[in-house]
């Protein structure tokens, strides 16, 4: 009703225009009530307003006293962000509150000790300042938690090798090769140009190894 009156006054509407245009804003039971009015039963918009409010006064929500703000407390597992949103929603149901009272009530209902301690050093002077600091505190916590989660999921480089995976043996150096491999390597390198002198004759050596089948 107040919103309609203010809008029509801005449009410089006459009293009769306000009475006739009022039905356009109505729906449901309010629309039915308007069209059941007896002809010529309303002489002015003041009478129309009074009749309307009398008919629907029972549907008006009663507003709570401003002391109700101090009963709004942050719950045990409720985040700071959710608490502020719930506090602002409940504050709309309170009648006659001001900024200082809301600031005092919201601060007294805080259960977030770290946040309360951080703003206790430099208390906010307005409700808007308190909400701004609360949002910054919440964003910092969310960013910090996100970084911790990333660090936990990152590989550390020391994961255990699966059981079915065979450990890789270190590659062998040149001195760890088998004797046969060393013999082939030396053979592939070519003939020697100098030899150690023999301490016996060639004929004696051939006679000595003939019985061992070392010669083809």
Image (spheres, helix red, strand yellow):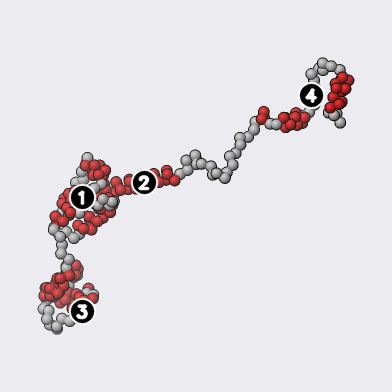
133 or 9, nearer to the observer: 133
Q: Nearer the viewer, mark 3 or mark 4?
A: 4
The mark closer to the camera, 3 or 1, is 1
Residue 39 as seen in the image, left or right of residue 176: left
Q: Which residue is mark 2?
A: 145
Q: Which residue is mark 3?
A: 32
**Closer to the N terminus: mark 3 or mark 2?**
3
Is residue 88 toward the left or the right of residue 47 in the image? right
Badge 3 or badge 4: first in the primary sequence: 3
Q: CA distance from mark 3 to mark 4?
A: 122 Å
Task: Name which of mark 4 and mark 2 comes first in the sequence.
Answer: 2
Is the C-beta separation of discs 3 and 2 under 8 Å? no
Q: Residue furthest front?
A: 211
Task: Say which mark, if any, is on residue 192.
Answer: 4
Image x and y of residue 149, in percent: 40, 46
Do the residues under discs 3 and 1 have CB atoms within 8 angstroms?
A: no
Residue 15 can be seen, yes or no: no
Pick whichever, 166 or 8, lies toward us.
166
Q: Position of residue 81 (x, y in %)?
A: 28, 52
Q: Judging from the image, what secondary structure is the residue with disc 1 in?
A: loop
Q: Secondary structure at mark 2?
A: helix
Label ID, residue 109: 1
Q: Earlier in the sequence, mark 2 or mark 1?
A: 1
> Is 40 placed left or right of 204 in the picture?
left
């Amino acid at each position: 009703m107040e919103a309609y009156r203010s809008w029509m006054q801005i449009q410089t509407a006459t009293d009769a225009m306000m009475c006739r245009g009022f039905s356009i804003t109505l729906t449901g039971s309010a629309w039915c009530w308007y069209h059941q009015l007896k002809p010529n039963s309303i002489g002015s918009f003041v009478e129309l307003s009074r009749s309307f409010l009398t008919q629907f006064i029972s549907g008006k929500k009663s507003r709570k006293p401003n002391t109700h703000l101090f009963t709004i407390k942050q719950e045990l597992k409720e985040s700071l962000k959710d608490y502020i949103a719930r506090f602002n929603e409940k504050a709309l149901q309170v009648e006659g509150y001001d900024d200082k009272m809301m600031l005092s009530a919201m601060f007294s209902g805080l259960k977030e000790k770290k946040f309360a301690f951080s703003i206790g050093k430099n208390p906010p002077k307005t409700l808007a300042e308190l909400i701004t600091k609360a949002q910054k505190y919440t964003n910092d916590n969310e960013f910090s938690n996100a970084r911790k989660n990333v660090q936990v999921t990152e590989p550390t480089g020391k994961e255990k090798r699966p059981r079915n995976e065979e450990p890789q043996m270190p590659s062998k150096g040149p001195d760890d090769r088998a004797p046969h491999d060393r013999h082939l390597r030396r053979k592939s390198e070519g003939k020697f140009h100098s030899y150690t002198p023999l301490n016996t004759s060639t004929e004696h050596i051939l006679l000595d190894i003939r019985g061992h089948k070392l010669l083809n």
